[in-house]
Image: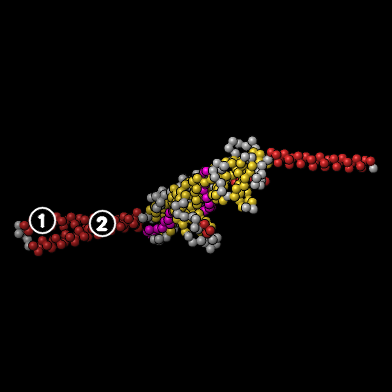
Amino acid sequence: MIARNLGLCCLSASLLLVACDKKTEEKKAEISGVPVTVAQSESRKMALLEESVGVLESLADPVVSAEVAGRVAEVRAVAGAEVKAGQVLAVLDGRDAGLSRQAAQAEAGRVGSLSANQTRNLERLKQLREKNFISQAALDDAIAQNAATENQLSGARAQLGLAERTLGKTNVLAPVDGRVERQIAITGQYVKVGDPMFQVVSLKKLRARLPFPETLSGLVQRGMPVQISVAGSDAKLNGKISEIRPMATANNRAFDAFALFDNPGNWRPGATVTATVVLEEHADAVTVPEQSVVLRPAGEVVYVVEAGVARQRVVQVGINQDGRVEITGGLQANETVVVDGAGFLTDGAKVAVNAAQPPGGVQ
């Protein structure tokens, strides 16, 4: 019985000590204030950013088709090969075209010789007419024959040029610098005029297709700056929105914006691209750390420290970027605001600023 009473006495003493310690701490807090860290509100440039994940596209991806009929004699470029404009991709059997060229060349030579002879004969007849040895009608007939022969020569030379052009088309050439995306033709295949043989994708100029939700259709505009990057590359390119397709797709209710830029060297069409578009920029925005803004019944507020006391300010907020919040109303630059501990304060509470924080407050 004595032991039980002794235990109860010890428990009561312990509870009394804890209560005393708690009251002591509360009194100390009332005297010294709630421990907080502070920072200065600053003017800085703030930007409203919107990210989009899209895909790279080539501005030119022509399908190279056969311009003359023939059998594929040789394929010189396969899928994935890097090619230059004018490089031979394949060679068609040119024997028929070569024979046509020889025939046209022979005909042009024959008519050329005939025309030269007619020209010499005409000069002689003109001399004879001056001496009145032939009639004017005979001279006029020679002039007409010479003109007809010259016309025949022009036609023969045109046929020769056409034959040479046809022979040149037996070499299938790359239309642009780029990469062979598809090799369709194979050696031994017979192709007709217009049959596809290769698809070449240009790598010099690229376009980023960027989808945005339809809720931003009034905000994303042509000319807006955009920063583009792709996975696996350290390059970050700055460009501008060059085109917008305002129609939202039925599948995801998004519209597409496009940005054009020069390939930095190793980017490829079809790659995933990440883009950041600057929707708005405010040059001299008043900003505070985002921890400084807390929600109270009055709305969003910050606590400004004045003579060791936290004064509640109702503020209007704007852009949130890189851990800082733009204050569009209710606060000026270079005011001291509470950062850590703001969520525990009420208007008029005493505060004790943590002396260990970095100079200028928490950033």
Q: Dividing the picture into quarters, in which one does residue 104 lie?
A: bottom left
Secondary-structure class at tag 2? helix
* Disc 1 to disc 2, C-alpha distance: 27 Å
Disc sitting over residue 157 in the figure: 2
Q: What colour-coding does the image apply?
A: secondary structure
- Whether 361 is drawn above or below 135: the answer is above
Front-lying residue, 188 or 326: 326
- Expressed as whole percent of the image width and height from the top left, the position of residue 257 reads 48, 55
Q: Is residue 210 magenta?
A: no
Q: Identify the amino acid type marked 2.
A: Arg
Disc sitting over residue 124 in the figure: 1
- Expressed as whole percent of the image width and height from the top left, the position of residue 22 reads 76, 41
Binning the other alpha carbons within 10 Å of mark 2 as few (below 14), some (14 to 19) or many (20 upward) gives: some
Side of 15 where 138 appears, left or right: left
Q: Which residues are the magenta region? A: 43-70
- Whether 10 is drawn above or below 132: the answer is above
Which numbered disc, 1 or 2, marks the residue that appears first in the sequence?
A: 1
Q: Residue at x 10, y 61 (%)?
A: 139
- Expressed as whole percent of the image width and height from the top left, the position of residue 187 reads 44, 55
Q: Dividing the picture into quarters, in which one does residue 253 lie?
A: bottom right
